[in-house]
Amino acid sequence: MKPAGFTYHRPATVDDAVAVLAEVGPAGKVLAGGQSLVPLLNMRLAAPEHLVDVNRLSDLAYVRADGDGVTVGALARHADVERDEAAYAVLPLLRDTLRHVAHPTIRNRGTTVGSIAHADPAGELTAVLALLAGTVTLRSAAGERTVTAADFFTGPMSTCAGAAELVTSVTFPVPEGRTGTVWTEVARRHGDYAVCGTGVVVTLDDDLRVAGARAAYVSVGPEPVVLDLTEAVAGEMHDAADWPAAGRLAAGRLDPDDDIHATAAYRTRLAEVLTTRALREAAGRAAGATTAARREASGGDQ
Amino acid sequence: MTTKAFGEPIARLEDPRLLTGQGRFLDDIGHRALAAAFVRSPHAHARIAAIDVTDAVGVDGLVAIYTHDDLDGRAGEPLPLLIPHEALTHGRTGYALAKDEVNHVGEPIVMVVATDRYVAEDVCARIRVEYEFLPPVVGIEAARAAELLVHDDVPGNVSAHMVQENGDVDAALAAAPHVLELDLDIERSASTPLEGKGVHARWDADDASLRVYTSTQASTSVRAALAARLELPLDRVEVIAPDVGGGFGVKIVHPWPEEVMVPWAAIRLGREVKWTEDRREHFVGATHERGQLQHVKVGFDDDGRLLGLDVTVWHDNGAYTPYGIIVPIVTTTQLLGPYKPGAYRAEFFSLYTNTVTVTPYRGAGRPQGCFAMERTMDAIAAYLGLDRTVVRERNFIRPDEMPYDHGLIFQDGRPLIYDSGDYPATLDKLKKLIGWEEFEAFRAEARAAGRRVGIGIACYVEGTGVGPYEGGWVKVETDGTVVAATGLTTQGQGHRTVFAQVVAEELGVPVDRVTVTTGDTRRFGYAVGTFASRAAVMSGNALASAARKVRQKALRVAGEALEADPRDLEIVDGVVRVIGSPSGAPGGSIPLATVAVLANPLRYAFDREAERATQFGGPVDISKPPVAEGDSPGLEDTGFYSPPRSTFANGMHAAIVETDPDTAEISILRYCVVHDCGTLINPRIVEGQIHGGVAQGVGGALYERMVYDDAGQLLNASFMDFLMPYATEVPVIETDHLETPSPLNPLGIKGAGEAGVIPGSAVLASAISDAEGFAITRMPISPSDLYSLRLERQPR
């Protein structure tokens, strides 16, 4: 379990980094937190000739939150995002989800952007980015471009990023309207990759009726799956909606595989149960958030 | 610290060192050594047609490449079959490097030695082995069907077939009012210590001597095996187990292929060589355990009393049988637990498969036996509509029936006779601890809230402290400190603490004045090893014997100095004094340090302490020789303990589980243990042993399995996919103790090392069955498995 030989690069600026990537081309691999890449190297499942360590690019070590969303730089660790109060205030789903990502020691080292660039279909953050229809920003020597999550993820462990491109940031937009979000999953052990996990957004109208219900899933397909489940519950009151119908709708649309930890039938069952539970909880949060916001708006100077 | 040491829950003396990173494990040794790596078979069953090293020989840093053809003399012979048995008619072992056939994925074929491990692995990747594929035998059913063979010359894939019978089982079953049959299934797991194997060897050509460090449970036996295999005089070989990061059974196997090859290469190259096993190698290159299919036929009366028990076990022994058939023997004898079985017949078939070899893993066949018996007890209770504890109690061996002879032969080749134990009292304690009688109220409450809960129980008896012997050596130094050594090894159990407690108690010195060395053949050459919950029983009693002899000598020497009768003397806090007198009284006391000085008459005064022992250092009786006839200099002695047979500890576990009606997730709400390992040396360490065992039991019940595909590939050979429980998966463990001393040894102790793991699968299967309303017969069980079982019963 020792990696094959490679040439190690440690650029000091983003410009230098993309210059190195351009030079080494497909023979290069970016190293950030290393929580996925280093095991692959040690097991010789990956043997890039060049390793471009971006840990000196401190310009990319940021989390920026405003009313529109949260932008995470390539060197922000999961723990930075998890603990960022401003990010939590506008988008609590990030912290709620990150608590399910591995263990604190791994979150202290692993980067949120790195896990998205790795595009593991079992990665929670890839699903959240897809759920929120977020964007990914890439830099190369030729310039910068921003793509949607849907365009970015092209298959299991594969993205549209070119060999000469560095993912510099991702943006998680705040969903519009009165919304509640939830992440829930079942894992074999605390912190393991989920057997099935789902993140949901429920949107309520002014009368607290369901206007939208979307869910994203991990570990049930080759890439993040996002389902619009609104049709099962549209117009129903937030506390009386037929959430199990939405769960059944989701289960019917997913086509997971068997693996050594669970059968496809079990994963489908989990998707149904977790979808039902998460949507019900998210609707409650949306209603509660609305109530809390109204109370704050009307009772500011009591 | 007071003199009173034995029985006290003192903190482990080794922990400050281990917890501050000062441990010295195998890979901490020999930083300048050459590194070894091995080319291992990627195929489960194949003939080796050719090995091509053309692309490898030019690599910078390569030192040597070895294959079986290079192994001269005895090094090239098959590895030893460590525990022969007359029933093991077709025992087979592998080679240090595979000769012409490989029988499991992971078997070593080529050894590479290079300047570092990176280069060694680069070289391995460039060596091409050409294989002729043979169809693999994977799984017990395929082995039993025997349409394909693992070894051409082993018909039916059967390495051993053994039957033990006590009474006329067929007649008992024919006459029994009720008969039930059960088919049971336990999957593979493994010891999985966090530190894998590792070997470092240094050959001193000037001294013609070999020093080997190895992460082992049996350094004396590794030494003997290496001396034989490398054709060296025994006194030119020393083997040391450094700090060892867990063993749990796997490291009792020896000599491993790597344990032969690393010293062999070190001698041949005249250089230090080291090999440290990586995690992936450990999964496929060490050993596994547990896999069995079982068939139980039981006859019983209207009260649930056993009349006849007929058990057949198909045991998966993997590719080879280096450790004999200990595991299935233990399963079929220890299965009986605390019960009187009526007429009993145990039959097993030990079967070859093209998978990693099976050798004992903590519990060593007992968890499977306990599973068979306890599932049977639950089945009888369900059939008769009786409380599960009532059925068990009715079948218990009573305290007044001890010693109880089962009429069978145990794994040590000696009669299976229980020495002591109070099973009804143990059960009473457990029922109180878990609240057995109050559970139905809790279940009703939970059910009203839409929750599904269940309670389970499992009982076991564990043969511990198997022979043949262990020894101990104790010496009082002239500064009053005490050094002690025993030959068996330590892998984290806390031996340095408990053995210090034993010695301190006998010698009357503070426990922190005693330093204990284990597993170093330079310090103590006669030993068997650490396995079968034997260290405390064996080395504890041996060290007590040695310390007692030292005490007698100290009293004799002190008596001469104090002009007192030794029978009037005692040792308190390291000072010999007249019984009851204060330690400072002039002429009435003498420090043990001074006694040690006086016990070794000297000619040369190399320091002030020594001066007192020289011929002109003080008053001497010139009518006698300085060292009396039959005596020896120094305040030291050696003791041995050899038991007539094993001593039998026991315990009972109960658990309350909750199963999610929707997701089939399984949560352990409570886990209670009542345990009796005789007299406790250190209750805190026993508690720790139980906690560690329960953690492994929970792992075996709910998480761990070795997933082989039909081609014999292990699909989960990593800690990502082989699910050892984290702290987050291990329940809070509530414990209570009984202390029923063993009459077989002076200290009255029984082993505790394996206890916690034994009933894990049995108790959790019992509780899950209770929650779900149907019998669980296959373990481990995952939420996905439980969901599938529900579907089978309630088609949607």
Image (tube, rainbow, N blue to C red):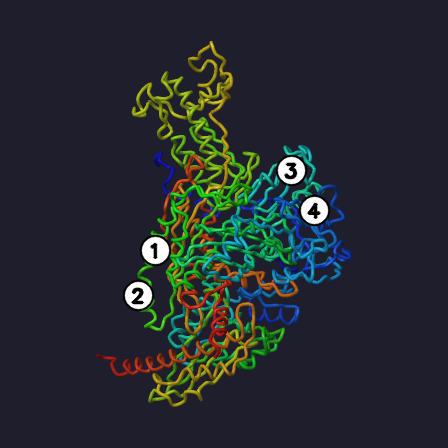
**B581 w.r.t. B700: above or below:** above
Query: What label sits on residue B441 in the rendered view?
Result: 2
Secondary structure under the numbered disc 3 in the rendered image = strand
Which image quarter: residue B234?
top right
Which mark sits nearer the N-terminus, 2 or 3? Answer: 3
Left or right relative to B583: residue B295: right
Label 3: how many Cα within 10 Å (few below 14, some 14–19, many 20+): many
Spot occupied by residue B690 in the image (x, y as percentages of width and height): 43, 50
The one nearer the camera, A162 or B637, is B637
Is there one chain holding both mark 4 and mark 2?
yes
Label 3 sits on what residue type?
Leu
Label 4, label 1: how far apart the Cα atoms are: 52 Å
The percent coordinates of residue B154 (x first, y second) are 69, 54
**Are discs 3 and 4 less than 8 Å apart at CB?**
no
Q: How many angstroms separate mark 4 from mark 2 (CA)? A: 62 Å
Which chain letter matches label 2?
Answer: B
Q: Mark 2 packing: few (<14 Cα in 10 Å), some, or many (20+)? A: few
Cα separation between marks 1 and 3: 56 Å
Observer able to see residue B19: yes
First in sequence, mark 4 or 1: give its number.
4
